[in-house]
Amino acid sequence: MSLCRNGPTIWASLAFALLLVLGALIAVPALAQAEPEREAATAVVGVSPDTWRQVRGGEVDANFRDSRFDSNYNLVNASGESWRQLRNRWVSPFGLIAIGGMIVVIALFYLIIGRNALSEPRTGRKLLRWPLVVRSIHWTVATLFIVLALSGLNLLYGKFVFRSLFGDAVWGAMISASKIAHNYLGPLFGILLVVLLARVLKHNWPKRHDLEWFKQGGGMVGKGHPDAGFANGGEKAWFWLLATAGLVVVASGFVLDFPNVGQSRDTMQWANIIHAVGALGLTAVALGHIYIGTIGSEGSLEGMTTGYVDETWAKDHHNLWYEEVKDQAVPEDQLTADKAASGDGSETASRPG
């Protein structure tokens, strides 16, 4: 009778003991995976300093090969440590110096020199500078560039800032979102960048007067503004930087985005370094481009928002182009009326050459 009364207690105790045993069996491999030393000891029995010296020395056999199919790497890949040191000691500081330095230079330039105002009052007559299709591609590429820059900076520096501020959960979500955005928007950016470069290539071939533009610092040195065609020397420099370093960044990004093509681990490491250095440098220069095209120069932003610029702006910044198209200037009132009549806001003036 007492056995029956104590039966539930005995069975509960046995069940609890069984759960403890199962929990211990599950916890051991989990703990081994969580701790690198215990994982190594579990994966390679009898690990000793001599074993690691043998592995690092390149004495490979079936026990020390990488687990990937047809791999030529040792269990310890010395090039991975070289990549890590290069990334942490050189690439990351370079990015902070380049981007931070550019921000400081722009701030000092604005405080000391100020905004580049128009030399004369506006005439109220407009010239078509950028058609709708170019503006659409430009703003799409610009938006993608900003998203990729911010997500890339988060991947590189985010853990030093946001992890301590918001904790692991928020920081982990930010890193995951940054990685997804970077991986999927990167190829789209690359394709549209090529389209944009091809569309404006005809305006960016170097000319002799571009050298004088650089000698005068775009008009900051000497008297008067240097000659400039549709694109001045600075705009052409930005174009060719995108057409060279920008496309290298895009190409290295494709290597990183599609590792299943068959490239080696060393190739991926070099692609990562090239991608990071190029992207950080372009981000720094892009800050200057954004500043000049917005608050740094009066009237510049209008060309890429409305498509039109005032005659005064054209004469100040692109006098050679102005002489070519000045007979196509349209009064602002007429332009507004034409757009209202068309109903779709499309350009009605002649397109730039």
Image (spheres, rainbow, N blue to C red):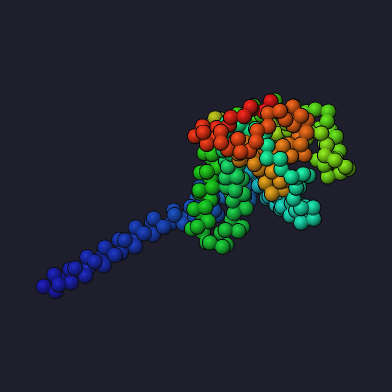
**For this rendering, which residue is in front, 233 or 227?**
227
Name the spot of residue 56 as percent of width and height, x first.
Answer: 65, 43
Name the spot of residue 320 as percent of width and height, x first.
Answer: 78, 30
From where the camera sits, is residue 219 visible? Answer: yes
Q: Is residue 163 left or right of residue 294?
A: left
Residue at x 52%, y 43% (from the top left corner) = 181
Q: Is the C terminus in the top left, top right, bottom left or bottom right quadrant? A: top right
From where the camera sits, is residue 258 visible? Answer: no
Q: Is residue 340 left or right of residue 349?
A: left
**For this rendering, which residue is in front, 290 or 82?**
290
235 is higher (above) or lower (below) than 4 = above
Residue at x 19%, y 68% (from the top left corner) = 8
Name the spot of residue 32 as percent of width and height, x first.
Answer: 48, 54
Name the spot of residue 284 as percent of width and height, x first.
Answer: 70, 46
**For this rendering, which residue is in front, 65 or 340?**
340
**For this rendering, which residue is in front, 119 or 116?**
119
Q: Is the N terminus in the top left, top right, bottom left or bottom right quadrant? A: bottom left
Q: Residue furthest bottom?
A: 2
